[in-house]
Structure formats: C-alpha cells, structure tokens
Amino acid sequence: MLATIWRRTLRFFDQNSGIHGNQLGFLSPLDGGQYEAYLGWSKFPRAINMHAMSILSLQSTAEERTHMSALQTTAISKGYFTMAASASSLGLLMLAALLSTATAQLSPTFYDTSCPRALSIIKSGVTAAVNSEARMGASLLRLHFHDCFVQGCDASVLLAGNERTAIPNLSLRGFEVIDNIKTQVEAVCKQTVSCADILTVAARDSVVALGGPSWSVPLGRRDSIDAASSAQVANNLPSSTSSLAQLISAYSSKGLSATDMVALSGAHTIGQAQCQSFRNRIYNDTNINSAFATSLQANCPRTSSSTSDSSLAPLDTTTPNAFDNAYYSNLMSQRGLLHSDQELFNGGSADNIVRNLASNPAAFSSAFTTAMVNMGNIAPKTGTAGQIRLSCSRVNS
Ligand code: HEM
C-alpha cells in the first residue's frame, strides 16, 4: 500500500512539479528542494506535505485514500503540521482538508439507504436509450467527460446556457436521456440524487451496455449552482488538433496521468465525429493510412459547407458500436480518425502504452475503469456545497 502511494507521489511530482501550486493560486511552485524533502516522511515540509497528499487523493483508489487519510491524521498528531503555520500554510491546511474531505465523502454506497432504487432506475434508462440508438451510449460517456474537465464533475454542462453552447459542447447529445432519468429518480426520491451522480453512473452503464467493462462508481457529488463560461470550456477541454504534449498537459492539470489519458481516449472505440473535426487530418496529415483517408474523403469534402461539416464517421472504423480495444489497433495502423487520436501513436512517449492496450484487452479494461474513477473524482462538490437540483437543466429557484 505504501509503495503504491510512494509510486503515485513520485509520478505526481514528476508530472506536476510547479504546475499545481500556480493553479491553486496561493501556493508557490514546488522546487527541487521540496521534492527532495518530500522523500523523507519525517522531513516533510509541513504545508507541502498535506497539500500533496490531498492532490494525490484525487488520483488514488478509495482504499489508498483511506490509508492516506490515516497517514495525515498520524502526521498531525505527531506534530508534523502545526497551527503555528504561516497564513499561507493555514490556507493550505484548509484547502487540504477540503480536498481530502471531498473525495473521502464519495462512496459507492452513498444512496444505499437514501435512495436504494436510484442505480437500477439509471441503468434501465440508459439501457433503453442505448437499445433504441447505440450511439447514445457514446454520447452519454462524452457528456460525463465534458462535465468533469470543466469546473469538475458537477453537472454544470447540463445547465441550459453558456457552457452548453460553447463551441466544443455544441455537438454534445443525450441531455434528454439524463432529464428523463432524473424525472424518474425524483419520483421515488425527492431531491436526493444529484445530476452529477446520475451522469457519472450513466457513463458507466453506457460502457456496459455496449459490451465494455463495469466498475463500482463512487457517489455523493452535488450539483453546481452555476455554469462555466465558454472561455473556461475552451481552456479546459483538449482539442482534436492537440499535440501529445498538449494532451498530457491537459490531463495532468486535472491530476490525471499519461496512462489515464491514453486509457480514457479508448472511449473513442465508440461514437462518431463530424467531418469538421477530422477534415484537416484526412487531407493534410501524413501519418494516416492512405486507403483510410481516401474512404473518408467521400463523405467529407475538402471544402467546408454547412451540410458536409456535420457529416459523420465512426471514431473506431473496425467495431464502431462495440466497447473493445480495437481503437488502439487502429492507431497502430494509422487509422486514428482525429489528429489527437493519432498523436497517441506517432513515435512518442505514449506508443508503448498504446501497444500494451492494443495487445491486451484485460489491461485496457483495468486501465480504463481506473481512469474513469479518477476522472469522476475531479473536484466533486460534497457536503453542503452546491445543491441537489430538481431538474438537471436548471438550478433550483
Ligand atoms: C483526449 C482528448 C480528447 C479529444 C481531443 C476528444 C475530442 C473529440 C471530438 C473532436 C469528438 C467528435 C465531436 C464531433 O465531431 O461532434 C469526440 C467524440 C467523442 N468523445 Fe472525445 N475527445 C477526447 C477525450 C475523450 C474522453 C476522455 C472521452 C470519454 C471518457 C471521450 C469520449 C468521446 C465519445 C464517446 C465521442 C463520440 C460521441 C458521440 O458519438 O456522440 N473523448 N471527442
């Protein structure tokens, strides 16, 4: 257990050194000295230690979080952290407490007594929607990703308004499926189950409905009382033109590793993209299979027009409606649909991860489910933060 935490710690600092301090506003970037100090438990700098463990808790399993929480308690009792800290350390302690409390409060059994029927209602709603249109499974999974990356998994993306009409969100689908499930859940448990949790569970059930792996979903998120701006959407979501370095950095800023990033991209084993998302790739990229590019050009002409821009092609050319690991084999034969997909296998640092996930379906299932839990843990609202919305598309009046 400790070895796992140390491994995550080292990985975290390798990938995040200097980044998160700036993002959190009142922290100065970690420097090499602090990194060194972190390696010895008894020599931890008091503030950084608490902060790092809280951030780490965002990308750890529930069991590891429990263990880290115990370590924090021990550390406090041994006086490693004192309230005689400076103002910034005090702020840090409060932040650390908030972060670790937030993730610690998420639990797969959260609604077991307050709304025992919630999970089965969500599953039935998702299964019915996917049975009537397979693509809906893909659309619900994408909706959850776009929710979590912008302002955390707080259902802000479901609110009618700015966030939903931001350019990367214009092609999102599935709002009415979530609204419909919410209505059914409200009918049995008034104002108890959040839209953020419904969306998180719906993403899992979508994967299962299309033949993918299942996992236990930590629950207890609450809903935001505001939507994000279109600028926040643009700044937080990676784009189809992103380079590998930009993709790694976008995920790292959410506490997700490069392995999480490659595994989550496997979601592109289902669903469709519009011509305007891959036009430049099929006419201008050189790392694309030429027969594949030619076949796509028939429905995606070089010149933009309102009809051709929205013409669809499957993200996984081999098994478009099956949640399997074919996406990675496609990348290895230069058949990634999006420029950003092919970046994962283009002679760079992610190549070996792609090779492993292409050759080993069990490794993909394991990496994907772990990464989905990690993504679902991004900045949840818990306790008394936010609200439980009555309707997913608007805040309570
Ligand atoms: C790695 C960075 C990512 C980029 C740049 C990206 C970009 C895109 C783009 C451009 C589309 C097509 C949109 C359109 O043309 O209408 C798309 C579709 C989709 N994305 Fe991603 N995506 C990324 C990661 C993810 C993740 C993490 C997930 C979920 C875990 C996901 C799930 C999906 C699904 C399922 C679709 C198809 C949706 C449908 O058919 O309605 N994507 N993505």
Image: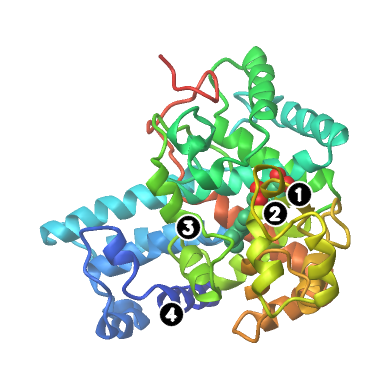
* Relative depth, front residue between 75 and 189: 189
> Disc number at residue 58?
3
Q: CA distance from mark 2 to mark 3?
A: 36 Å
User: CB of mark 2 within 8 Å of CB of mark 1?
Assistant: yes
Q: Residue at x 39, y 59 (%)?
A: 54
Q: Position of residue 349 (x, y in %)?
A: 59, 84
> Could you tell which of marks 2 and 1 lies nearer the N-terminus?
2
Determine crowd level at label 4: few under 14, some 14-19, many 20+ residues with C-alpha closer than 10 A: few
> Disc number at residue 312?
1
Residue that mark 4 sits on: 14
Q: Position of residue 316 (x, y in %)?
A: 80, 60
Pair 2/3: label in front = 2
> Could you tell which of marks 2 and 3 lies nearer the N-terminus?
3
Q: Residue at x 68, y 78 (%)?
A: 345
SS for callout 3 = loop
Kind of residue at disc 3: Leu
Kind of residue at disc 1: Leu
Kind of residue at disc 4: Asp
User: CB of mark 1 within 8 Å of CB of mark 4?
Assistant: no
Residue that mark 2 sits on: 275
> Could you tell which of marks 4 and 2 lies nearer the N-terminus?
4
Label 2 CB-ligand 1 distance < 8 A? yes
Q: Residue at x 78, y 54 (%)?
A: 313
SS for callout 1 = strand
Determine crowd level at label 2: few under 14, some 14-19, many 20+ residues with C-alpha closer than 10 A: many
Label 1 CB-ligand 1 distance < 8 A? yes
